[in-house]
Image (cartoon, helix red, strand yellow):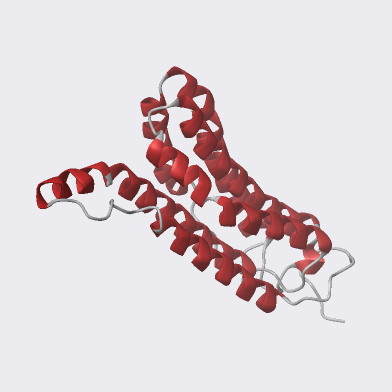
Amino acid sequence: MTNRPFGRHSRHVTVGPDRLLALGDAVFSIAMTLLALDITVPDGLPENDVADAVADAVPTMGAYLLSFAVIGTLWLVQHGLFRLIATLDRWLLLLYFALLALVAALPFPTRLISEYGETTTATACYAAAIAVAVTLVCGMYVRLLMNPDSAAPHTSRALLKVEIRHGVLLVLVFATSVPVAFYSPTLAKYWWLLAMGTRLLYRRPAASQD
C-alpha cells in the first residue's frame, strides 16, 4: 500500500483523476465556445446601421470576456487541484460533477447579464453562480484535507488550508455582492473587483511544507 503523508483509508471510485480531468477539459472548452455564440448582429443590415449594431453588441462582448476569464480561471484552478489528487473518492467525484454542471450552465447567467446587466436579478444570479462554483472547488480542497488518502504524496495540510482560506474569501466576495445588487447592480459589479486582491492575502506555501 502506498504511504500517504497523513490520513485514513476511504472508499474510492474506479475512474482515475486523469480521465476525469480530460472530461472536465472538454466541458470547459465547450462552455467557452458557447459563450461566443451570443455575440451576433442582425443579418442584412444597411451599411449605415452596422456601426449601431456593433455598439449594441458591446454589452454581450463584455459579458463574454468576463465569463471567459471566469471559466479560464476555474480551468486553471482545477488543474492545480488535480495535481494534488492521487485517488478519487465519491465525494470528490460528486463535487467535481456538480462543478462541471455549473460550468456548462454558465452561458445562461452570462446571457442574462449581457442582456439585463442593469437589473438586480441578472447581477445577483451571475454572482450566485460564481459563488457556488468557487464553493464547489473549495469543497474539493476540504475533502482532500478531511480524507488525505485521496491526496498525492507531496500534498501538505498547509497548502490545502491556504487554498481553502482563499476560496472562502472568494465566496464571500461574490456572495456578499448579491445583497449589494439589491441596492445597486452597478455597485455589485465593482464589488467583484475585490476578488482580484484576495490572492495577495495568502502566499502559496511550498508543496513539501506540512
User: In the picture provided, is 69 more to the left or to the right than 133?
Assistant: left
Report the residue at 15% width, 46% height from top: 49
Report the residue at 61% width, 59% height from top: 159
Quadrant, the C terminus: bottom right
Q: From what the image shows, is residue 86 above or below residue 97?
A: below
Q: From what the image shows, is residue 130 above or below residue 43?
A: above
Quadrant, the N terminus: bottom right
Residue 162 visible in image: yes
User: In the picture provided, is 47 more to the left or to the right than 148?
Assistant: left
* Count of numbered circles on the image: 0
Closer to us: 196 or 184: 184
* Residue 61 at x, y percent in the picture: 31, 50
Closer to us: 3 or 111: 111
Report the residue at 75% width, 55% height from top: 143
Q: From what the image shows, is residue 161 above or below residue 192?
A: below
Report the residue at 45% width, 44% height from top: 111
Closer to us: 18 or 84: 18
Residue 207 visible in image: no
Which of the 4 quarters of the picture holds residue 25? Answer: bottom right
The residue lying furthest to the bottom in this view is: 1
* Residue 48 at x, y percent in the picture: 9, 47
User: In the picture provided, is 189 more to the left or to the right than 52?
Assistant: right
